[in-house]
Image (cartoon, helix red, strand yellow):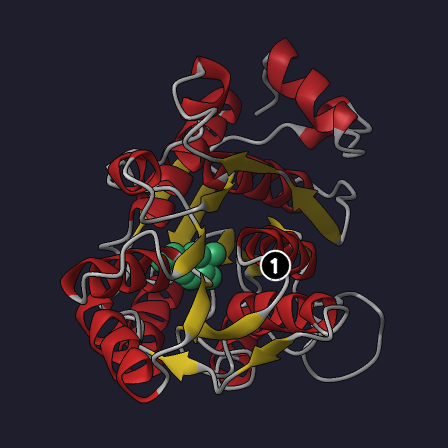
Amino acid sequence: MIKLFNRKAKALLLSLGIALTSTAAIADNVKIALIPGLTADAFYITMRKGAEAAAKAVGAELIYQGAAEWNVGLQVPVLDAIIARQPDAILIAPNDKDQLIEPLKRAHAAGIKIITVDTFIGNGVYQTGKGDADFPMSYVASENVLGGQMAARALAASIGEKGKVYVSSLKPGVSTLDQREQGFREEIAKYPNIEVLDTQYNDQDPNKAAAQFQAVLGRTPDLAGVFGANLFSAVGSANGAEQAGVAGKVKIAGFDAPASIVDDLKNGTLEMTIAQHPAEIGYFGVMAAYAVITGNPAPTKIGTGFTVMTKDNIDDPNVSKFLYTE
Ligand code: T6T
């Protein structure tokens, strides 16, 4: 049945380059699923809110289901359960860029439109007619290489452009983290007096990130800085610095913005953090899904913004509004 389309939602779609070309483009009973990287993460909780707002605007049903850990072995059964519910589209943050290709092919073969949000499969370039991972319709995410470059510049400035640093990350094969590290390393290579030590992978466990901080500090007493490349890496490294009594001395540039980050910024444990805009990712992910479900074109790549947070700007409501919600 054809129905009137929310004017605000239509204007937003147009600003994104998504044009609903005919009245036949409006559909009832649209079912869209969102599978986060994991459930217990303020980043995805905030993404879900944006997705729900968009689903409400277009009158679609949003199903939200995920695993409690960042683990391919747990995400794939969630995906299979969602496929069995036959949604029109699945938005998913794949836990691994290679290992989710085959499972997602099953969804694609079942006629479900796939959009990846936050993380990608393959190389994240879709609808090219090339490769076996180009079937998703769109990729909606932050510009993660750029985020890594921004963190590198901030960390370099805070350590006087010299000294030893390392990257605290989730695990190899996660597109977002790999890209942030790539951007960080490319940019930091421009500072000849900065040495980058081995990356520490924490499996999305802040306690592990804290323990790794202390272990690296133990063998590198002149450690100057850390790039905590996502929420658990940043928070865990900050905790590690506090436990070791070097908060503010070893500089930490973080990524992501849970509410707890405010204290870390204000007391100097964290120099800065790069807040992503997960609500935008969820919102535009649903809008892109709605467009393709209704036979309309959507961009194959939608990039969302960042807000850099420091102790000097975190009380500004235009900045703090990008703190994630729980
Ligand atoms: O940094 C986000 C997300 O972008 C990344 O893909 C995985 O980690 C987070 O969810 C934060 O925990």
Q: On the picture, is 21 further left or further right than 60?
A: right
Residue count near mark 1 (Cα–Cα under 10 Å), binned few <14, some 14–19, many ≥20:
many
Q: Is residue 49 above or below residue 104?
A: above
Residue 125 image-quadrant placement = bottom right
Q: Residue at x 53, y 25 (%)?
A: 58
On the image, the x and y values in percent for residue 261 come to 31, 41
- Quarter containing the N terminus: top right
- Quarter containing the C terminus: top left
The kind of residue tagged 1 is Ala
On the image, the x and y values in percent for residue 144 come to 62, 58
On the image, the x and y values in percent for residue 316 come to 45, 16
Q: On the picture, is 117 further left or further right than 39?
A: right
On the image, the x and y values in percent for residue 128 come to 84, 69
Quarter of the displayed picture in which ligand 1 can be seen: bottom left
Q: Is residue 297 above or below residue 164?
A: above
Q: Residue at x 68, y 22 (%)?
A: 12
Q: Secondary structure at mark 1?
A: helix
Residue 317 or residue 136, whichever sits in front: 317
Q: Is residue 38 above or below residue 157?
A: below
- Residue 5 visible in image: no
- Residue 26 visible in image: yes
Which residue in the protein does label 1 denote? Answer: 156
Q: On the picture, is 195 further left or further right than 311?
A: right
